[in-house]
Image: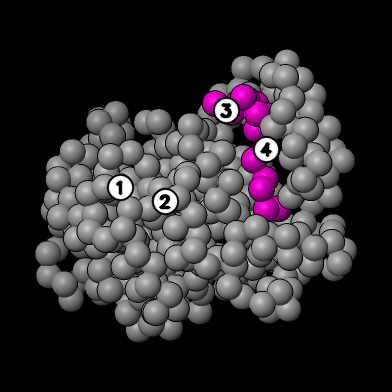
Amino acid sequence: MTGGWTKPIENSIEGLVHGMTHFDGVEFDLRLSTDDELFLFHDNHLSNAQIESIGGSKWTEDRSSEDLRELGINSFQELLENQDFTREWTERAKIACVELKMPHPKSKHVGSVNPRKREKHARKMARIADSMIRDIGPERNNIVLMSFKRRFRHVCSRSNVSWPVAQLQPAIPEIGGKRMKRILTLPSFMWLSLAFHLKHQKLVGAPILPCALEYLDGMTRHLTLGRTMGLSGYTGRRLNRLRKGYPVFVWPTQFRVESAISDLGLTGMTDQTSPELVTLPNGGARWTRWGTQPLDPERTSLLQNAESENHVALIQEAARETTPWPELTDIERRNFLSNWRKKWMWDRDIDELVMDSSPTTMPWEVSRLLGHRGSGNDTS
């Protein structure tokens, strides 16, 4: 839609503002510096270029806030001071999925395999993040704190965290490369079925189920115990009958399955955030604000069936003419919720859903598309 778009760096201010503006929200990662400041960074170690430029330890948690700023890594405080980001978050019903990352065991400053030491670090992160987010004041339905840290809900409870919390499962170890992590995670992935995760997350009161795409797509979905779930056909219908509207956030939502995620009423986390991507693999025009600027059936049909040469113009027209969620009337919001509830077999009563709805927030059940790490994974 714009010529020569360049993707911002993952977890950067620019990338997160882009994701928050063009999608229904974002997912991003936080790590803690040696002087207890939260920074927007995913990996447990710096890149070779970063290490060469600054010297010393490669582990992120061994670095001070001064070091990380020198490398151009943005702090969480900088993000919260960005009005373009916070306006979308607090006023326009956008959502933020905030993942707290644990240090590598070899980190000299806080690295350890001792569960108590790791929990102490996690509690510190949770307390700091909780306080900073409270100062901004988003709606409770507009944020969820997540982590692969075992017993993360226990950590947040002990830290008196006031925001919704979801455990990422199966737990991915901090050690090893990408291939090694997959190998170490495989037994848990096979043993813990998607049905188990759904039941467990509901039981502990988590607002959502963060779900790896491998549970729903490809041959890997057949590896787990229990009934197979999928993104289409009877396995997709089985998933919706099982979850009854319970929110499932799928990561990473590959471009080829984006339509299927939307059709099932799930929420996707995508790495494909370029505004130049206007045509989906199924031939339809791409719309990226499923929840915060919802399309009526007529507009949806028009975008799905339009010729590709008309996609740019039709998307621009939809952006101008479609009323965003904050500007809908109470009756219009109720109608959308009622239609979605019927289509995707939500369990909650419509009046309860409406109670969770306002110009600045929406029920957890609503299907959305989020920018993974803001503007997408740098390696995708």
- Residue bearing the label numbered 4: 287
Q: Are marks 4 and 1 in contact (CB under 8 Å)?
A: no
Q: Neighbour class for label 1 at 10 Å: few (<14), some, many (≥20)?
A: many
Q: Tell me which corner region of the image, top left, top right, bottom left or bottom right, holds residue 53.
A: top left
Judge from the rendering whether residue 290 lies leftward or rightward of residue 271; answer left or right. Answer: right
Name the kind of residue labelled 4 in the image.
Trp
For marks 3 and 2, give the CA distance.
20 Å
Q: Tell me which corner region of the image, top left, top right, bottom left or bottom right, holds residue 15.
A: top right
Residue 273 drawn above or below residue 364: above
Numbered tag placed on residue 221 in the rendering? 1
- Residue bearing the label numbered 2: 235
The residue shown at (79%, 51%) is 324
Q: Earlier in the sequence, mark 2 or mark 1?
A: 1
Q: Which residues are magenta?
A: 277-292
Would residue 286 be counted in the magenta stretch? yes
User: Which structural element holds mark 3?
Assistant: loop
